[in-house]
Image (tube, grey):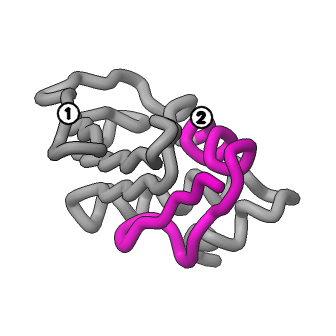
Amino acid sequence: MTNISSGSILDGAVQGADAVRAVIGGARQLYDRQDFNFVGPWGDNSFIEDYTAEVRGTPIGAVHLIEFNADGEAQHIIVNYRPLSALTFFSRLLHEKFAGTPYAEHYLAVEEA
């Protein structure tokens, strides 16, 4: 089973290939642009992406580490974003995007004025 967890953007973990695709795909749909700094193998059974994206004019950095099982399938994905101000902004946008789905609970709710 594939799962995704992150100390920076998710509260908890998302499990299952469909859920992981939904969360990653939903996040990437919000990118205005994405510029890769490094993409490639990391150790014996991992792959890493280091990139900068822009979400509604806000730059955000990201590192994704994908670990593979013995069959070469993604087993575990760790996603970390930076800086904190961009991370919280992005998390609130994702909460809005996933409203009405089980994924919304993993992101920050929009603050009331």
**Residue 64 in magenta stretch:** no
Q: Depth-wise, is mark 2 or mark 1 nearer the camera?
A: 1
Q: Earlier in the sequence, mark 2 or mark 1?
A: 2
Q: What is the number of the mark on residue 80? A: none
**Residue 22 in magenta stretch:** yes
Q: CA distance from mark 2 to mark 1?
A: 22 Å
**96 in relation to 59, above or below:** below
Q: Residue at x 28, y 38 (%)?
A: 47
Decide: few, some or many residues near mark 2? Use Cα within 10 Å; few <14, some 14-19, many ≥20: few
Residue 51 quadrant: top left
Q: Residue at x 74, y 43 (%)?
A: 18
42 horizontally vs 105: left or right = left
- Residue with the mark numbered 1: 41
Could you say where residue 11 lies in the image, as x and y percent from the top left?
54, 76
Name the one closer to the observer, 52 or 109.
52
Describe the element under mark 1 as helix, strand or loop: strand
- Residue with the mark numbered 2: 25
Could you say where residue 79 lies in the image, as x and y percent from the top left?
37, 55
Q: Residue furthest front?
A: 70
Could you say where residue 110 lies in the image, as x and y percent from the top left?
61, 69
Decide: few, some or many residues near mark 1? Use Cα within 10 Å; few <14, some 14-19, many ≥20: some
Disc 1 residue type? Pro
**107 in relation to 98, above or below:** below
Could you say where residue 53 lies in the image, as x and y percent from the top left?
30, 33
Name the one closer to the observer, 29 or 15.
15
Tell me the magenta residue range.
1-26
Disc 2 residue type? Gly
Q: Residue at x 47, y 56 (%)?
A: 76
